[in-house]
Amino acid sequence: MRLSTKSRYGLRALFDIAYNAGSQPAQIQDISRRQDISPRYLEQIFQGLKKHGILKSKRGPQGGYCLAKSPEEITVRAVIEATEGDTLIVDCAGRRKGECGFDGSCVTQTVWEESNSRLNEFFESITLKTLCERGETLGIKREQDHRFMYFI
């Protein structure tokens, strides 16, 4: 599986919001600067994350983006599914099973299904809170100190 920049940048941006913004909306320009991601591209990514209930936005001079859920409720899997559509390694596994002419008679199909299941379990086990804890361990400097707060 090769993830697109939408997933990788989306996860980095969500980490940035959880780690730096606290209860305040995060400005796209600040996220862009800290994560070195184009503001226009972030806007595109954020539209999908809003649609999937991961982010919400607030308009106006004090506006920006905030998490729609607490950091411990947002998993890496949810972010990938919001940006990629699914986490399938190959089309013949999971929800797309049955699209292959060898369905039910292919010895490798079980390999893909099991690897997909394990990968999903792993992605489900890591949350934004986990990433924030790792950020602290790595000594990543915060622009605003807070402890896993969120804006609702």
Image (cartoon, grey):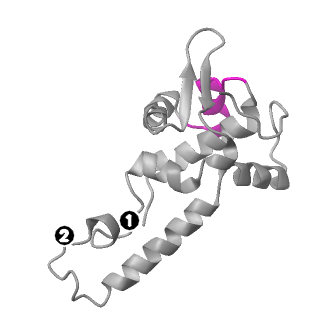
Tell me if residue 2 comes above or below residue 129 in the rendering.
Answer: below
User: Looking at the image, which residue sits at the far top?
Assistant: 61
Q: Which mark is residue 88?
A: 1
Report whether 93 appears left or right of 132. left
Which of disc 2 and disc 1 is earlier in sequence? 1
x and y, in percent, of residue 42 in the image: 50, 33
Report the residue at 75% width, 48% height from top: 132
Asked whether disc 1 touches disc 2, contact meaning CB atoms under 8 Å apart, the reply is no
The magenta segment is 24-37
Q: Total label count?
A: 2
Q: Which mark is residue 99?
A: 2
x and y, in percent, of residue 88 in the image: 38, 65
Q: CA distance from mark 1 to mark 2?
A: 13 Å
Q: Nearer the viewer, residue 52 or 21?
A: 52
**Amino acid type, mark 2:** Glu
**Amino acid type, mark 1:** Leu
x and y, in percent, of residue 57 in the image: 55, 23
Report the residue at 57% width, 60% height from top: 124
Q: Quadrant of the N terminus?
A: bottom left
Report the residue at 14% width, 78% height from top: 101
Q: Which mark is residue 36?
A: none
The picture quadrant where one finds residue 33 is top right
| Secondary structure type for disc 1 | loop
Q: Is residue 26 one of those drawn in magenta?
A: yes
x and y, in percent, of residue 146 in the image: 83, 35
Report whether 91 appears left or right of 70. left
Characterize the local packing of mark 2: few (<14), some (14-19) or many (20 or more) Cα atoms within 10 angstroms: few
